[in-house]
Image (cartoon, rainbow, N blue to C red):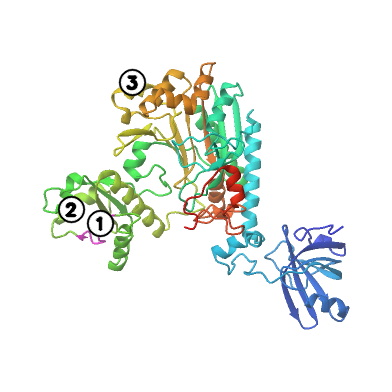
C-alpha cells in the first residue's frame, strides 16, 4: 500500500497514529539538526520532520531530496511545536521513520506555487506541472462540482443525457467548421460539431421531451480570452415549451449553481430587450453591476458651430460619478484608450461638473455654460461628476461608448468579481443584413423561431423581425443562449427562402430535418451554456484557459504536444489530400 492517508486530512486528533503518505516534495527546510519537508498531494500539504540526533541516516536521505521528487513516507503523527494556521494540517507533522524514493525528478522550469514565476507560454508548455499548482487544481475541482450539480439538477427534472455524433456534415452558415477527411469516402469530409443543434431538435421529434448533454464543441475562429477552438457546452432542449418555460427552468439552474457552489442566493433575473440593451449600454451583454447608462444629447449639441457634432448621426454621453477631479493626464489616457485601433474613436469630449457648480469642458469654445448645464441635466449629473461624450455613426459609436463605460467602471472599482448580476436579454433581431452581399443572415441560426406577431414582416421587412431568442448574461459575459425553434415545415422553408437558400440547397443541407418535421415535430426550444465561461466567472478568472485542463494558446496551438502538426506524406496520400505550398 503506497498510502493509507492523504496529505490533507490529518488533524490534531490523529496524534500518535502511524500513517503512510505518498506525494511530491514541495519544499525542504534545513534548521540545525532538523530537516523539514512539505509533502504535497492533490488533497493538501503535510509537514514531515527528520531529526538528525534520532536517525542521522534518515535525515541525510531527506537532505538529498529535490523539489517535486515523488516519495513515500511512514511515521507517527505528532503535534507541531510551531503551528501553521494557514493550512488545515498546520497543527501536526509526521515524525518520519521510513522513506522511499518512488521517483526522482528534475528541477521544474517554474515554481509550483500559487504565485508562480512561470509566464503563460512556459506554463502551457509544461501544463502537467502547472496543474499541480493548488490554484489551478481548484479551478478544475470547481468545474467537476459544477458539472455534477448540473447533472443532478437536470436529472431531478426528467432530463435525459444523450450523446450525439462528433463526426457530422458541414453547415457553413455559422462559424468555420473543423473539417475531417474520410479515408473510406475519398474526396468527402466530416465536420466537427459547432453544437449538437440539429440532433437535439431531432431528439425532440423522437419524443425524448427533455434532453441535455455536457458536450465538446468545435469552432475554427479567431481566439480571445473567452474563446477556445474546442470548448464545452451544457446543451439542453425541451418539448412543449414557450420562451418563459425555458427561462424559468434555466434561471433555476443558475440559481442552484450559485447556491450550492458559492452559498449565494440570487434574486430573480431582470429581463431586458436587445433594443434597450443597445440603446442604454451599446452591448447585447451589458454589465449591470453599475449604472452609467448612455444618454443621447444630439439634439442639445447641434447648430453651435462644432462640426464634429453637427455632422454626427449620434452623440452619446455617460456620467462618471465623482470623477470631476480627473487630471488632464487621466483624461488624455481615456482619449488614447478610445482612439486605440480596437475601439476606433477619433477623439473624446469631456465636461467637468466642478464641486462649486461651474462646468468646464474641452469644447468651451463652442458651447456656453448654459449649454453644458443642459447636457448635465440630461445626464442627471451632479457637482463632482465627469461627463464623457463620443459621436459618430450610431451603432459604431455606441460600441465605442460601451468600451469606454466598461473602462470607467473598472477604474472606479465598480466591477467587483464577487458581485454577481444576472439578466436575460430577449427579443434579438432574427436576421442581420450583409450590405455588401445584399442578403440576410441568421443572427443566431436558421432554426430560430420569429416572434409570432412578427412573422408577417418576413415578406415586407425582414430586418424588423424579432427572434424568440434569449441570452443569459452574468457580469457582462454571455454565458448561455438559446431560442424557441421553428417546428413547422412551411415556416422553416420560408426562413430558408429569406436567407437566400434555394429549395435544392436547403434540401441538400437540411433535408433530413425538414423531412423529420413532416412526421410530427412538437413545439420545442432550448439553450446552451458555456461551461468554461461559467466556471471562469465562479472562479473569478479573466480567461477561460485556467479552468480547462489542457487549453490551446491564443494561436490555437497546444504548445505542450505541439499541435496542430504536419502529417506524413503517406497519410496524405491515403486520404487523397494534396498540400499546396507546404513549405510556406
For the residue labelled by badge 2, is the local secondary structure a helix, a strand or a loop?
helix
Label 3: state its secondary structure.
Answer: loop
Separation of marks 2 and 3 at Cα, in angstroms: 40 Å
Q: In the rendered image, which residue does mark 3 sit on?
A: 456
Q: Residues within 10 Å of mark 3 (few under 14, many from 20)?
A: few
Asked if residue 290 can be seen in this view, the reply is yes
| Sequence-wise first label, 2 or 3 | 2
Q: Is residue 304 above or below residue 169?
A: below
What residue sits right under mark 1 in the picture? 346
Instruction: Please tell me how crowded label 2 is: few (under 14), some (14-19), or many (20+) other residues with Cα within 10 Å.
Output: some
- Report whether 46 appears left or right of 539: right
Q: Position of residue 416 (x, y in %)?
A: 47, 54
Query: x, y (%) of residue 558?
Result: 57, 56
| Horizontal side, residue 449 vs residue 459: left or right | right
The numbered mark at residue 395 is: none
All told, the count of numbered labels is 3
Reply yes or no: does residue 557 show up in magenta.
Answer: no
Work out whether residue 171 or residue 340 is closer to the camera in this orientation and state it: 171
Residue contact at pointers 2 and 1, CB within 8 angstroms: yes
Q: Earlier in the sequence, mark 1 or mark 3?
A: 1
Question: Which percent across, then down, holds residue 123?
Answer: 59, 63
Which residue does the image show at 72% across and 58% down from the upper left?
A: 42
Q: Is residue 566 above or below residue 479?
A: below
Front position among marks 2 and 3: 3
Q: Which residues are magenta?
A: 345-362
Which residue in the structure is indicated by mark 2? 308
Amino acid at each position: 500500500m503506497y498510502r493509507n492517508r492523504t496529505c490533507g486530512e490529518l488533524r490534531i486528533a490523529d496524534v500518535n497514529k502511524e500513517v503512510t503518505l505518498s506525494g511530491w516534495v514541495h519544499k525542504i527546510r534545513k534548521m540545525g539538526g532538523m530537516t523539514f519537508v512539505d509533502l504535497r498531494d492533490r488533497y493538501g500539504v503535510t509537514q514531515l520532520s527528520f531529526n538528525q540526533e534520532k536517525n542521522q541516516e534518515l535525515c541525510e536521505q531527506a537532505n538529498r531530496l529535490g523539489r517535486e521528487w515523488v516519495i513515500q513516507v511512514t511515521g507517527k503523527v505528532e503535534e507541531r511545536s510551531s503551528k501553521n494556521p494557514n493550512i488545515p494540517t498546520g497543527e501536526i507533522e509526521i515524525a518520519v521513520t521510513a522513506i522511499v524514493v518512488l521517483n526522482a525528478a528534475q528541477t521544474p522550469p517554474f515554481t509550483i506555487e500559487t504565485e508562480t514565476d512561470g509566464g503563460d507560454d512556459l506554463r502551457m508548455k509544461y501544463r502537467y506541472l502547472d496543474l499541480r499548482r493548488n490554484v489551478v487544481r481548484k479551478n478544475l475541482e470547481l468545474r467537476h462540482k459544477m458539472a455534477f450539480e448540473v447533472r443532478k439538477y437536470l436529472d431531478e427534472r426528467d432530463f435525459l443525457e444523450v450523446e450525439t455524433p462528433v463526426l457530422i456534415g458541414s453547415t457553413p452558415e455559422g462559424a468555420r467548421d473543423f473539417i475531417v477527411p474520410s479515408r473510406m469516402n475519398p474526396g468527402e469530409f466530416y465536420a466537427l460539431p459547432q453544437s449538437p443543434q440539429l440532433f437535439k431538435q431531432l431528439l425532440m421529434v423522437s419524443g425524448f421531451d427533455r434532453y441535455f448533454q455536457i458536450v465538446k464543441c468545435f469552432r475554427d475562429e479567431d481566439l480571445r480570452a473567452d474563446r477556445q477552438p474546442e470548448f464545452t457546452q451544457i446543451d439542453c432542449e425541451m418539448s412543449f415549451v414557450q420562451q418563459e418555460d425555458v427561462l424559468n427552468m434555466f434561471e433555476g439552474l443558475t440559481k442552484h449553481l450559485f447556491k450550492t457552489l458559492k452559498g449565494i442566493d440570487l434574486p430573480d433575473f431582470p429581463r431586458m430587450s436587445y433594443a434597450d440593451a443597445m440603446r442604454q449600454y451599446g452591448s447585447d451583454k451589458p454589465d449591470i453591476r453599475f449604472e452609467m447608462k448612455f444618454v443621447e444629447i444630439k439634439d442639445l449639441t447641434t447648430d453651435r458651430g462644432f462640426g464634429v457634432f453637427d455632422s454626427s448621426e449620434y452623440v452619446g454621453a455617460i456620467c462618471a460619478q465623482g470623477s470631476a477631479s480627473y487630471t488632464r493626464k487621466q483624461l488624455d489616457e481615456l482619449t488614447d484608450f478610445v482612439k486605440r485601433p480596437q475601439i476606433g474613436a477619433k477623439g473624446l469630449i469631456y465636461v467637468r461638473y466642478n464641486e462649486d457648480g461651474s462646468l468646464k469642458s474641452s469644447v468651451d469654445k463652442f458651447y456656453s455654460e448654459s449649454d453644458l448645464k443642459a447636457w448635465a441635466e440630461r445626464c442627471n449629473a451632479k457637482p463632482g461628476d465627469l461627463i464623457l461624450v463620443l459621436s459618430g455613426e450610431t451603432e459604431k459609436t455606441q460600441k465605442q461608448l460601451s468600451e469606454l463605460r466598461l473602462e470607467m467602471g473598472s477604474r472606479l472599482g465598480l466591477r467587483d468579481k464577487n458581485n454577481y448580476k444576472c439578466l436575460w436579454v430577449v427579443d434579438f433581431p432574427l436576421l442581420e443584413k450583409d450590405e455588401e452581399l445584399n442578403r440576410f443572415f441568421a443572427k443566431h441560426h436558421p432554426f430560430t423561431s420569429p416572434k409570432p406577431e412578427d412573422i408577417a414582416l418576413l415578406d415586407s421587412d425582414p430586418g424588423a423581425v424579432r427572434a424568440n431568442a434569449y441570452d443569459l448574461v452574468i457580469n457582462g459575459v454571455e454565458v448561455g443562449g438559446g431560442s424557441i425553434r421553428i417546428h413547422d415545415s412551411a415556416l422553416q422553408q420560408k426562413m430558408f427562402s429569406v436567407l437566400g437558400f434555394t429549395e435544392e440547397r436547403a434540401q441538400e443541407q437540411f433535408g433530413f430535418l425538414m423531412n423529420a418535421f413532416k412526421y410530427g415535430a412538437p413545439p420545442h426550444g432550448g439553450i446552451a451554456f458555456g461551461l468554461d465561461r461559467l466556471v471562469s466567472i465562479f472562479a473569478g478568472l479573466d480567461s477561460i484557459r485556467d479552468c480547462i485542463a489542457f487549453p490551446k494558446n491564443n494561436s490555437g496551438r497546444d504548445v505542450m504536444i505541439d499541435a496542430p502538426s504536419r502529417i506524413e506524406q503517406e497519410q496524405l496520400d491515403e486520404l487523397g489530400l494534396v498540400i499546396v505550398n507546404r513549405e510556406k
